[in-house]
Image (cartoon, grey):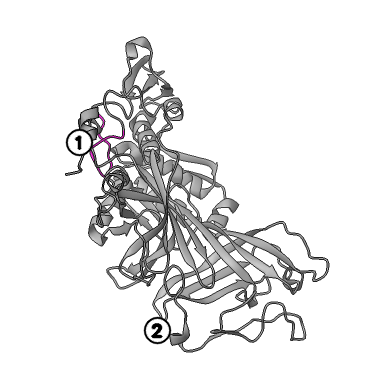
C-alpha cells in the first residue's frame, strides 16, 4: 500500500526487528505545510494503533486501508470496522484474537485542533479472508464496538429500582457499563412502583427506561455519539460524555442554542476546500411513503385498548399520524399526507383500524409506569422520525456533524430548473429542502479522505399539501413567482 510522502514509518507492520517478535511503529510527520488537500477537508491521521493483549502499542498506519464507523440515534453503541492489508503475518505475529483495543486520532494541520480522539474501541470479530499462496498475505477487517457496549453485554442486572427518580435509575444502570459521564435529560418521573430488571443487560434496561420516559408526551432516546461531548462542571471538574439519554425535543432545543449547519447540494466549481461552507456531493432519496408497511405497523390509525383486570373495565384510545388532533411534533406543522389522501382517511365504524394493541394497565399492577401512558408517544415518535428520509455525502473534516444533530438542507428545484434552464440561481426545492434530524452517520476514513454519509429524516414538511391544489391550467402557467 503506497503511503503519502509525509508519513515516515521506520517500522512498518510487516517487519520484525526485535528479539521477541513485537515492535511498535513510530509515526512522525514532516512540516505541516506539505500536507496535501484531502478529499473531505484537510486533516492528518495522527495515529491508528492497536493495543495487544500483551500491552504493546502497534501502529496500523502502514497496513490500514480504511475505517468505517456507524453511529445511529436508535443504537446504544457505535460500531465499525478497519480494513487491513497484512503482508507480514500480523495475526500470527501479534496473536490477534479479539479483545484488543484500538486508538484513533485525527487532527487539523498547523492548528493541531483535534478532529477525533477515541481510545475505547474493542475488537470483537476478525473478518473472513483468503490467504495469497505466494505472499501468504491477506486483506481482512477487524470489527469493533465501544468498550461500554462490551461491558454491558457481559453483565446482567438483577436489581429492583424503587422510590427514586427515573433519572437516578438510568444513572445507576449506566454506571454498570461505563465510567464516563452521561448527558441526561431528567424526565421528572418518580418510580413509586419498582422497575425490576430480571437479568437485562444495562443498555437494554436503559432502553426500557427511555420507553417509560415517553409518558410525558416526549419521545426519548438512548444512543452513543462518535464525537464525545467534552467540557467542565460548575466546580471545574472535567466532563466527557459519549452517550445521550434524553428527548427529541431536547436535541431540537440544543440546536437553537448551538446552531444548525446549512448543507447545500450544488457543485463546487473551483474544487477548493471550504471550511465554512458544507456541500453535499451526493443526494439519494431513500424509500419513502411506504404506506402499506406503515399501515401494518399501525402508524396511521391504531387503537390502544387498556384492560384493568382488577376493576374489570377498559379504556380505548385512538392514535395515529392521520388524526387531526395529533401534531407532527417535528420541525414543521405540516404533515406528509394531505387530509384527503386515501392513507389519511379511516372509518373506525367500518373497522378500518390496521393497528390494534391490547395491553394490561392498572394502578394495582406492578408496572413502573403504566404502559397506556407511554406507548402512544413511543410508537408515534419512533415511526414518525423514520417516515421521510434522504441520504447525503458531505466532507468529514470540516464539521462536527454527528447523530442527533439538526441540519438545514438546501437543494435547487428540479421543476424550476426544467422550466427556466438558463437561470443561474434557481429557487430551492421546498419538497426536499428544509430541516432534518441526523438519525445516522457513516464515517469513511482513509489516509487522504474523510467522507460522512448522513441519514436525514423527518416527519413533517415545509409546504402544506392541503393547499397545493394545482389544476392543469395552473401547471401550464407556473412561473414559480
Verify whether residue 81 appears in magenta.
no
x and y percent of residue 272 in the render? 37, 72
User: Where is the C terminus found, in terms of image quarters?
Assistant: top left
Residue 97 horizontal side relative to residue 255, left or right:
right
Q: Give the label on residue 110, or none.
A: 2
Mark 2 lies on a secondary structure that is loop
The main secondary structure of the magenta stretch is loop
x and y percent of residue 391 in the render? 42, 50
Image quarter of residue 276:
bottom left
Query: What residue appears at the point 74 percent right and 86 percent down from the top-left corner?
Result: 18
Which region is colored magenta?
A: 326-336
Q: Nearer the viewer, residue 188 or 30?
A: 30
Q: Is residue 206 above or below residue 306?
A: below
Q: Give the label on residue 191, or none.
A: none
x and y percent of residue 43 in the render? 45, 75
Within-10-Å neighbours for mark 1: few <14, some 14–19, many 20+: few
Residue tagged 1: 477
Amino acid at each position: 500500500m503506497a503511503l503519502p510522502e509525509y508519513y515516515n514509518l521506520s517500522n512498518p507492520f510487516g517487519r520484525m526487528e526485535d528479539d521477541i517478535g513485537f515492535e511498535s511503529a513510530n509515526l512522525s510527520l514532516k512540516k505541516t505545510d506539505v500536507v496535501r488537500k484531502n478529499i473531505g477537508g484537510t486533516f492528518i491521521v495522527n495515529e491508528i494503533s492497536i493495543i495487544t493483549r500483551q500491552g504493546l502499542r502497534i501502529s496500523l498506519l502502514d497496513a490500514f486501508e480504511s475505517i468505517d464507523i456507524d453511529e445511529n440515534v436508535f443504537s446504544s453503541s457505535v460500531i465499525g470496522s478497519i480494513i487491513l492489508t497484512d503482508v507480514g503475518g500480523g495475526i500470527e505475529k501479534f496473536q490477534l484474537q479479539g479483545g484488543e483495543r484500538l486508538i484513533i486520532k485525527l487532527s487539523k494541520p498547523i492548528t493541531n485542533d483535534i478532529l477525533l480522539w477515541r481510545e475505547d474501541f474493542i475488537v470483537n470479530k476478525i473478518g473472513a479472508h483468503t490467504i495469497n499462496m505466494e505472499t501468504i498475505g491477506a486483506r481482512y477487517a477487524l470489527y469493533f464496538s465501544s468498550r461500554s457496549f462490551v461491558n454491558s453485554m457481559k453483565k446482567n442486572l438483577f436489581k429492583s429500582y424503587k422510590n427514586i427518580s427515573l433519572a437516578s435509575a438510568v444513572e445507576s444502570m449506566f454506571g454498570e457499563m461505563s465510567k464516563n459521564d452521561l448527558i441526561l435529560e431528567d424526565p421528572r418521573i418518580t418510580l413509586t412502583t419498582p422497575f425490576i430488571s430480571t437479568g437485562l443487560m444495562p443498555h437494554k434496561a436503559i432502553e426500557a427506561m427511555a420507553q417509560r420516559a415517553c409518558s410525558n408526551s416526549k419521545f426519548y432516546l438512548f444512543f452513543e455519539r462518535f464525537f464525545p461531548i467534552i467540557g467542565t462542571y460548575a466546580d471545574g471538574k472535567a466532563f466527557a460524555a459519549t452517550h445521550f439519554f434524553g428527548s427529541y425535543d431536547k436535541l431540537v432545543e440544543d440546536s437553537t442554542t448551538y446552531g444548525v449547519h446549512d448543507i447545500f447540494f450544488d457543485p463546487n466549481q473551483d474544487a477548493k476546500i471550504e471550511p465554512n461552507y458544507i456541500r453535499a456531493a451526493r443526494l439519494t432519496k431513500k424509500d419513502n411513503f411506504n404506506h402499506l408497511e406503515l399501515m401494518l405497523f399501525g402508524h396511521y390509525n391504531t387503537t390502544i385498548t387498556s384492560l384493568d383486570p382488577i376493576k374489570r373495565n377498559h379504556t380505548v384510545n385512538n392514535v395515529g399520524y392521520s388524526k387531526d388532533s395529533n401534531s407532527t411534533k417535528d420541525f414543521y406543522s405540516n404533515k406528509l399526507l394531505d387530509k384527503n389522501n386515501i392513507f389519511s382517511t379511516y372509518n373506525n365504524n367500518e373497522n378500518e383500524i390496521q393497528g390494534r394493541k391490547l395491553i394490561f394497565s392498572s394502578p394495582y399492577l406492578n408496572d413502573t409506569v403504566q404502559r397506556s401512558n407511554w406507548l402512544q408517544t413511543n410508537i408515534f415518535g419512533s415511526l414518525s422520525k423514520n417516515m421521510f428520509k434522504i441520504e447525503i455525502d458531505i466532507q468529514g473534516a470540516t464539521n462536527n456533524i454527528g447523530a442527533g444533530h439538526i441540519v438545514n438542507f438546501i437543494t435547487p428545484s428540479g421543476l424550476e430548473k426544467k422550466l427556466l434552464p438558463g437561470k443561474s440561481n434557481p429557487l430551492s426545492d421546498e419538497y426536499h429542502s428544509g430541516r432534518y434530524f441526523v438519525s445516522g452517520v457513516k464515517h469513511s476514513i482513509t489516509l487522504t479522505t474523510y467522507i460522512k454519509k448522513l441519514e436525514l429524516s423527518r416527519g413533517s414538511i415545509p409546504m402544506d399539501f392541503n393547499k397545493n391544489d394545482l389544476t392543469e391550467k395552473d401547471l401550464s402557467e407556473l412561473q414559480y413567482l
